[in-house]
Structure formats: structure tokens, C-alpha cells
Image: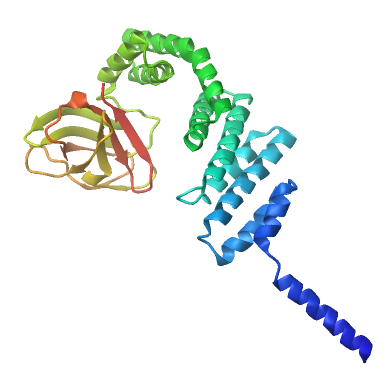
Amino acid sequence: MKKLGLVLMLVFILVLTSCSSDPMAEGDKFYQEGQYAKAVNMYNEVLKTQPDNSIAREKAALATVKVGQELYNRRKVLSPFVKYYENAVTLIPDNTSQEFNKEFSVLLFELAQAYLNSEPRNNQEKKERFDNVLMYYDEALFYDPDNSAAMTALEEFQNKHFAEMMEKGTQYYQKARKQKNDLYYLNAEYYFKKANKFNSEDADAAKMLETVRKINLNKINPDLDYPLAIISTLVKDEYTAVQVYLENRTAGTCNVQANMFMVLDKDGNEYKGEITDVFNATFKEGTVASGKGIEGVISFKTGGKQADKFDKLIFDSPEGIQSVKYFP
């Protein structure tokens, strides 16, 4: 009888200990030990009952990226690193702590380096690698502007590739002029845009970018889900009118509304699209079938700004796909 009572007491103590365990503390312990998968499990336990716990979300995000980084370091395969990073992004709270920002910035820098060291299998992968290296360096500096490793790496990358971007842009521009090929003009804009970003003070890069953007205003990019073109612009009273052409190259239909369009001026101000009776050829809102296009005039209440004051026109689709057309 005494032995049975002792067993029951031990079971009660074990249950009590289990119930009083702290999954956040256990997650921290696993994280410090480098057992990131176990840390993720513990932080997820916290989030089951406290989904808005910003500290747990930050810690779960960091640990999730670390799992992907571990897999990358073990196999030298980039996809797990990218996949776990993308999963981590969904966990990040709206307002992050300074500690999180610094640590996440380091991980973004290391992801950029992983892309830089990867071997592309074709030209498309080479272009994607190039874009992702730049994107993750920029993201690293967004989270921590004092990340000196990311700043140095970005400057070295830009200096190294500036001449290459100018050369490729010039090659596509010359091909486009000889062969009258719209796609070559679009490719030229891509490379001159990169060159201009790498060295915004270079007059040749700025001039060539402006030149090809003027040419490309009314050309569509067939690689986009929603190719966008600017046919013309006009100013009247308080409004700037933009005659746009939009195609739906997705598999489904799209309900296109004027307020899905926005122009940004060169000072960063945003103006939403409207339907007004100020201009003729008003944009006809409605459903656009797959493979079809829609054209018309969208009004933007800008205070009467001319087109040369704008940076870009943006279309945001209902499913979150964004298309951009830059003004010269």
C-alpha cells in the first residue's frame, strides 16, 4: 500500500512538472545549443495559445531560417535555405525588435552569399541569382543599415558588375535598333536600370535608361502575368490622365478596377486611379478573360502634374501580382 502511494506521488510530481514547463524557455535553450528544429517546435507550442506573441514569432522566424541554413551548409543545396526563409517571413510580426533586426540582417546577408556562391544551370537561373543577390543584400541593410559586411559586399558587387550591365544594355539596345525587336528594348532597360542603380552618378547610364524607357512606354513585357503599357498622358485641371493598356496572361479571369492602378511621383507621393468624366476614352472597369487586354484612360488626382514628374505606374492585381511601368 505504501509502495502504491509512493508511485502515485511520483506520477503526480511528473505530471505537475510537465504542466509547469515553459516552452519559450525550452526553445531558447535549444536555440542556444544549435538545435534549431527543436527550438522551432517549442516556439510553435507558444504560438498555439498565443498567436500574437511577437517575441515568440521573432524567435520562431530566426530558428526557422537557421534550420534552412543548416541544411544548406550540410548539402550545399540552396533550395532548403530559400524555402525555410520564405516560411520564416510569414512569422515576422509587424513591429520587430532591434535585436531581431540585427540577427535577421545577418541571416539575409548569408542567404545573399549563398546565392552568390551557387552555380546557375542556365541563363534564366543566372539572372535570378543576380537579382536575388542584390535583393537580399538590400533586405539585410533594410533590417540593419549598420550591417557593414552587407554594405561592403553590396558595394563590391555593384562596382564589379557596373561595366557588365552597361555593356549588356548597349548590346541589347543596338540589337533592338537593327532588328526592330521590342523584347530587346525591354532587355536593354533591365540592364541600364541595374547600371543606373549601381552608379546613379554616371551620366551615360542615366541617359541610356531614359532613352529606352521612352521607347518602352507603349511596349508590353511578355514575361509578365499582367503586361502593362502607357499609350499617352494628358493633364487637365487637377488630374493627370494616363491611357493604359493591360493584358491578362494568367490562366484565369481578372476583375480590373481603376483603383488597382497607382502612380508614384519622383518625390515618393502615391496617387490612386479613378474613373472621372474629365477625359474621353474612360477606362471601362470589368472582367478581363485570359489572353485578353483592356485599354482606356485612368485619372489620377495629382494637382495637375506632368508625366515627367512621375517615376512609375503600378498595377496591383487582386491576387497580389504587381506589374510596373517606369516613366522616362
Q: Hey, which quadrant is residue 304 in on the image?
A: top left
Q: Is residue 120 visible?
A: no
Foreground of the two, 88 or 140: 140
Q: Position of residue 70 (x, y in %)?
A: 70, 40
Foreground of the two, 125 or 104: 104
For residue 61, side relative to residue 202 (left or right)? right
- Point 68% across, 55% down: residue: 27
Q: From what the image shows, is residue 46 above or below residue 28? A: below
- Point 59% across, 40% down: residue: 103
For residue 150, side relative to residue 237 (left or right)? right
Q: Residue furthest bottom?
A: 1
Quarter of the picture holding the N terminus: bottom right
Q: Position of residue 188 (x, y in %)?
A: 38, 16
Q: From what the image shows, is residue 54 above or below residue 84? A: below
Q: Position of residue 313 (x, y in %)?
A: 27, 33
- Point 61% across, 62% down: residue: 46
Quarter of the picture holding the C terminus: top left
For residue 66, side relative to residue 151 (left or right)? right
Q: Position of residue 220 (x, y in %)?
A: 31, 28
- Point 45% across, 14% down: residue: 165
For residue 290, side relative to residue 7 (left or right)? left
Foreground of the two, 78 or 85: 85
